[in-house]
């Protein structure tokens, strides 16, 4: 018998603190979730740009 989808994600996600934060984000309003996603996208883009500049 397979575990729940949440258990499978937990097993594959090494950073448990980050997983906990994502679970908390899921409880936010649509607008707040969008803001969090925008921030994450901006951070990832910044890191990619920094790597390209090296």
Image: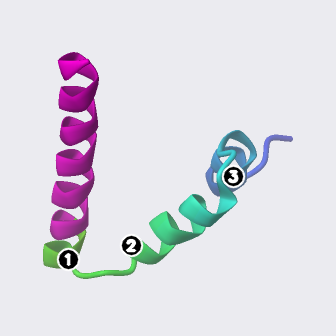
Crowding at label 1, few (<14), some or many (≥20) Cα neighbours within 10 Å?
A: few
Q: CA distance from mark 1 to mark 2?
A: 8 Å
Range drawn in magenta:
34-54
Q: Is residue 23 magenta?
A: no
Proximity of marks 1 and 2: CB atoms separated by less than 8 Å: yes
**In the foreground, 10 or 51:** 51
Q: Position of residue 16 (x, y in %)?
A: 68, 59
Q: Which residue is mark 1?
A: 32
SS class, disc 2: helix
**In the foreground, 48 or 25:** 48
Proximity of marks 2 and 3: CB atoms separated by less than 8 Å: no
Q: Which residue is mark 3?
A: 10
Proximity of marks 3 and 1: CB atoms separated by less than 8 Å: no
Q: Which residue is mark 2?
A: 25
N-terminal-most mark, 2 or 3? 3
Disc sitting over residue 44 in the figure: none
Crowding at label 3, few (<14), some or many (≥20) Cα neighbours within 10 Å?
A: some
Crowding at label 2, few (<14), some or many (≥20) Cα neighbours within 10 Å?
A: some
């Amino acid at each position: 018998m397979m575990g729940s989808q949440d258990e499978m994600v937990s097993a594959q996600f090494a950073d448990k603190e980050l997983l906990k934060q994502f679970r908390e984000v899921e409880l936010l309003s649509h607008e707040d979730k969008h803001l969090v996603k925008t921030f994450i996208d901006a951070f990832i883009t910044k890191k990619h740009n920094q790597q390209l500049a090296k």
